[in-house]
Amino acid sequence: MSVDEILKRYFAGERSFQRVNLQEAELTNANLQDADFSYADLRQTRLGKTNFSQAYLREADLSEAILWGTDLSKADLYRATLREADLTGAKLIHSHLDEANLIKASLSGANLKGAKLSRSLLLQADLRPSSEHRTDLGYAVLCGANLSYADLRGASLHHANLDRAKLCRANLSRIVPWEDLATDLSEASLQDADLSYADLSGAILRKANLQGADLTGTILTDADLQGATMPDGTVHD
């Protein structure tokens, strides 16, 4: 099915495009709100600034797709493959990304506030600020997610749930010289998280819950731990 055919059918009221093959297609600035692209092949597809809000992309393959500024708010991306996808500035507010593959994805400046990312793979993902916005993971659920080696410098993870998450050797340090862009983990839950050898220098961890977390080799130089619950259950003063 061609892009023109999809847009024609969508305009006519059709919403089901499951398993469609649009590999390497150009589909930018389109409105596909509420459309169902579950199991679709969207590898290397250019989808910049397309409206996929509340769309279904369950188990779709978006490997290496370009999604600059794409609106995926409240979209269902359960088990979707976004390996090496470019989601710079994308809107993923309250999106469903449980068990999604985001290995080496670029999420620079993306808005993931309240997104569900339990057991997702974010190894070596880039979550640094873009030239316009910081990456927002406030209130996101990342239970059991794998963020090993991810670059989270300057990201906002305020109130995020990172229980049992793997952050081995992840970079969560303050971006120098922008002192106002310290990685914000205030009031985040990191119970039983693996933070071994992660860099949290200059990070904000006020009232964060680190009970049971693995801090082997973790760098906490100049980190703000006021009121944080430490691995042994004590509260940092």
Image (tube, rainbow, N blue to C red):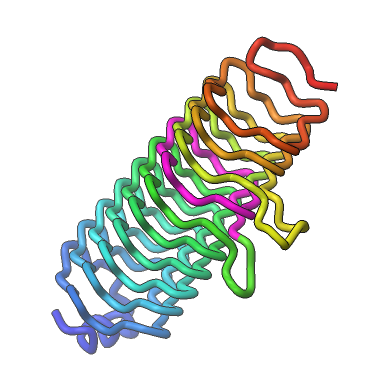
Q: Is residue 151 magenta?
A: yes
- Residue at image location 48% in from the left, 32% down from the top: 143
Q: Is residue 64 above or below residue 155?
A: below
Residue 59: where, in percent of width, then height?
A: 25, 52
Is 76 displayed left or right of 182 in the figure? left
Quarter of the image that includes the C terminus: top right
Q: Relative to residue 112, is residue 188 drawn left or right?
A: right
- 49 vs 217, left or right, is left
Percent position (x, y) of residue 66? Answer: 35, 73
The single residue placed furthest to the right in the displayed view is 237
Query: Which of the 4 quarters of the picture holds residue 75?
Result: bottom left
* Magenta part of the chain: 135-156
Rendered residue at 25%/67% (across/down): 16
Residue 130 x %, y %: 57, 69
Residue shown at 20%/63% (left/top)?
Answer: 40
Indicate the quadrant where residue 4 lies: bottom left
- Classified by dominant secondary structure, the portion drawn in magenta counts as loop
Please give the name of the residue rendered at 36% of the width and 53% of the height, measured from the top-left corner.
Answer: 77
Return the x and y of residue 144 as percentages of the image width and height.
43, 31
Magenta run includes residue 105: no
156 vs 119, nearest the viewer: 156
